[in-house]
Amino acid sequence: LKWAVHKRKTTNEVGLDNNQGGFIQNKKQKRRTLSERIEELKSFYVAHGHVRPFKKNNDLCAFCSRLRHARRHPETSTMTLTEDHISALDALRFDWVGLGNQTNTKSFSDRI
């Protein structure tokens, strides 16, 4: 019994909620809308001249990955992209393929 109480204290201290089984959302974080996130991408574009966030900007990088997934797999995505969203991202020259999904179209014999 003492071990269970001790474990519960420890998981609560690290941000886990024992009742819901997941992380507690930071109360300081505000959930942003898709339009607000696109505005963040516009700011990034103005600052850097492209819309390929770096790994050190992990939040925006992950958002771009979710955008690509939402466009490729709308039936399984939790994000709904409208034509207005897509056209706004196209205006920023958003890379819908992403670096991790590019395939080499040349055959192996052509590459050597």
Image (cartoon, rainbow, N blue to C red):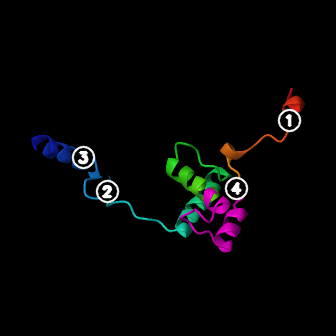
Q: Which residues are magenta?
A: 69-95
Residue 108 location (% of width, % of height)? 84, 31
- Dot 2 amino acid type: Ile
- Dot 1 amino acid type: Ser
Q: Earlier in the sequence, mark 3 or mark 4?
A: 3
**Which numbered disc, 2 or 1, marks the residue closer to the eye?**
1
What residue does disc 3 label? 11
- Dot 4 amino acid type: Trp
Residue 65 lies in the magenta stretch: no
Residue 79 lies in the magenta stretch: yes
Query: Do residues under tags 3 and 4 come within 8 Å of each other at their CB atoms?
Result: no
Query: Do residues under tags 3 and 1 come within 8 Å of each other at their CB atoms?
Result: no
In space, the residues marked 1 and 4 are separated at their CA atoms by 24 Å
**Which numbered disc, 2 or 3, marks the residue closer to the eye?**
3
Residue furthest to the right in view is: 110
Q: Earlier in the sequence, mark 3 or mark 1?
A: 3
Q: Secondary structure at mark 2?
A: loop
What residue does disc 1 label? 107
* The C terminus lies in quadrant: top right
Q: Residue at x 53, y 67 (%)?
A: 36
Q: Earlier in the sequence, mark 1 or mark 4?
A: 4
Q: Does residue 100 appear to the left or right of 10 in the view shown?
A: right
Q: Earlier in the sequence, mark 2 or mark 1?
A: 2
What residue does disc 2 label? 24
Q: Secondary structure at mark 4?
A: loop
Query: Do residues under tags 1 and 4 come within 8 Å of each other at their CB atoms?
Result: no
Q: Earlier in the sequence, mark 2 or mark 4?
A: 2
Residue 6 location (% of width, % of height)? 15, 42
* Disc on res. 96: 4
Q: Label 2 neighbourhood size at 10 Å, few (<14), some (14-19), many (20+)? A: few
- Above or below, 9 against 38 in this view is above
Q: Does residue 112 appear to the left or right of 14 in the view shown?
A: right
